[in-house]
């Protein structure tokens, strides 16, 4: 697993199907035929990861949305990220290298 820092950018896998019902998200990874259920906070983070986002931004958003202390949000976001990376549901986003204009 890659080392995660507050600057690490994450994003959803593009080949995951998902549905949110009553604040909980069900994520399906078709090629593996696995289904994962996310709670309210996990569902919120999943939505935030529809585009690449740094962990620091996710922590900030959780603090805003759920009125929790930063240390608690940071621990929760990092645990969520590690779990979903292990389950192959999210990816560490590496920006494309810029082309040289030489």
Image (cartoon, helix red, strand yellow):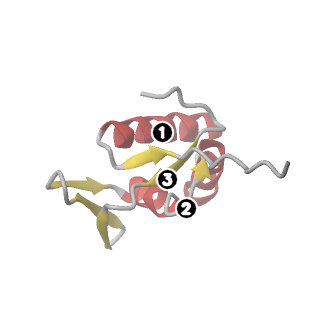
Quadrant of the image occupied by residue 71: top right
Residue furthest out toward the left: 33
In this picture, residue 29 sits left or right of residue 15: left
Tag 1 and tag 2, C-beta contact below 8 Å: no
Q: Are marks 3 and 2 in contact (CB under 8 Å)?
A: yes
Q: Residues within 10 Å of mark 1 (few under 14, many from 20)?
A: some
- Report which residue position mark 1 lands on: 76
Mark 3–mark 2 distance (CA, rounded to whole Å): 6 Å
Looking at marks 3 and 2 on the same chain, the residue that comes earlier in the sequence is marked by 3
Q: Earlier in the sequence, mark 1 or mark 2?
A: 2
Question: Within the image, what quadrant is residue 51 found in?
Answer: bottom right
Q: Is residue 22 above or below residue 58?
A: below
Name the mark on residue 11: 3
Q: CA distance from mark 3 to mark 1?
A: 17 Å
Residue visible at 39% across and 61% down?
Answer: 14
Q: Secondary structure at mark 2?
A: loop
Q: Which quadrant of the structure image shows residue 88?
A: top left
Which is more N-terminal, label 1 or label 3? Answer: 3
Residue 66 on image: x %, y %: 55, 55
Residue behind mark 2: 51
């Amino acid at each position: 697993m890659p080392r995660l820092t507050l600057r690490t950018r994450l994003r959803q896998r593009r080949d995951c199907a998902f549905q949110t019902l009553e604040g909980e998200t069900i994520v399906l990874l078709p090629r593996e035929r696995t289904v994962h259920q996310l709670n309210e906070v996990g569902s919120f983070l999943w939505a935030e990861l529809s585009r690449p986002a740094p962990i620091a931004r996710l922590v900030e958003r959780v603090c805003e949305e759920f009125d929790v202390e930063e240390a608690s949000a940071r621990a929760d976001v990092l645990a969520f990220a590690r779990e979903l990376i292990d389950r192959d549901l999210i990816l560490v986003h590496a920006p494309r290298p810029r082309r040289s204009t030489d």
